[in-house]
Image (cartoon, rainbow, N blue to C red):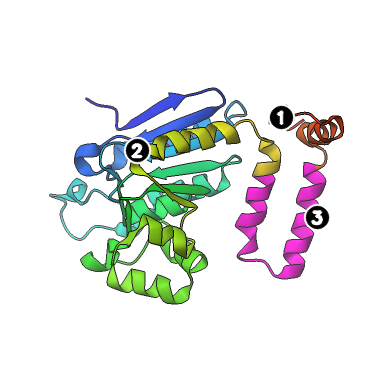
Amino acid sequence: MNEVLLVTRHDGWMELTLNRPERLNAFNEALHAKLAAALEEAGHERWRAVLLSGAGRGFCAGQDLGDRAGAEGPPDLGETLERFYNPLVRRLRRLQKPVVCAVNGVAAGAGANIALACDIVLAARSAKFVQSFAKIGLVPDAGGSFFLPRLVGAARARALVLLGEPVGAEQAEHWGMIWKAVDDTALMTEARALAAHLATQPTQGLALSKAALNASAGNALDEQLNLERDLQRAAGRTPDYREGVAAFVEKRAPRFTGRPA
């Protein structure tokens, strides 16, 4: 049986590829379990960046509806979110290193929102993002109702959710939904280069920056200023800060290690 998740370990970073191309990489329980285990490993100090992508012609079609075929009675979809999708989104946001997502085709439903939960999203120009929940009588999940209004604004988020219309990669970039749209043939080369670059950067500082950004949506200005103070205090005590200053003074390229101390 094929592995539902491909894990490639590079020098300092991990590449995770959803590998159910015959189902547009839709999630079933096996894929959830494999991805959770891989992200747990990615939390180790050895790894300083993560790249998430999908095999075949799509990134992820969300939940595999066929996975529920034959079940008796109405499913408890809230339980599915509680067990699988909510922990996945929290892992991606809380992982103390950058997560790059390369969207190579359709990203629909929870698949679109899992992409948006990553830190930096690149998409092939042919890719599309679809909030497909309305088409089957459901509400956006996997963080969609949180991420979309913050990324594209309330008016666009409401239309995307209520109409379920696809958004192309270039439009997504223009709206600020993603970082960048790139040529299809260049997607993985650019995404891998970005992950490899991030794996050479001051990992602790990036993790603290990620914590600040995660908290900003719910904080008042005074709370955020206090958080920045505390996080900056922690960043100033890292070896990479000392190395960064030394490299600046000595007019050379820094050699960051990513170590906490």
Magenta segment, principal secondary structure?
helix
Q: Contact (CB < 8 A) between labels 1 and 2?
A: no
Classify residue 21 by image quadrant: top left
Identify which amino acid the numbered label 3 is placed on.
Answer: Arg
Tell me the CA gap for discs 1 and 2.
Answer: 31 Å
Identify which amino acid the numbered label 2 is placed on.
Answer: Thr
**126 or 34: nearer the viewer:** 126
Q: Secondary structure at mark 3?
A: helix
Tell me where the magenta segment starts and ends, as one range.
Answer: 207-235
How busy is the neighbourhood of tag 1: few (under 14 within 10 Å), some, or many (20 plus)?
Answer: some
Q: Earlier in the sequence, mark 1 or mark 2?
A: 2
Give the percent coordinates (x, y) of residue 143: 44, 59
Give the percent coordinates (x, y) of residue 70: 12, 49
Seen at 15% across and 54% down, the residue is 72
Give the percent coordinates (x, y) of residue 56: 26, 37
Q: Is residue 247 left or right of residue 154?
A: right
Residue on which the image places disc 3: 229
Q: Secondary structure at mark 2?
A: helix
Q: Is residue 214 magenta?
A: yes
Q: Which mark is residue 138?
A: none
Q: Nearer the viewer, mark 3 or mark 1?
A: 1
Residue on which the image places disc 1: 256
Q: Nearer the viewer, mark 2 or mark 3?
A: 2
Q: Nearer the viewer, mark 1 or mark 2?
A: 2
Residue on which the image places disc 2: 185
The quarter of the picture where the C terminus appears is: top right
Q: Is residue 86 magenta?
A: no
Q: Is residue 60 left or right of residue 220?
A: left
Q: Earlier in the sequence, mark 2 or mark 3?
A: 2
Q: Earlier in the sequence, mark 3 or mark 1?
A: 3
Vertical placement of residue 167 versus 54, above or below: below
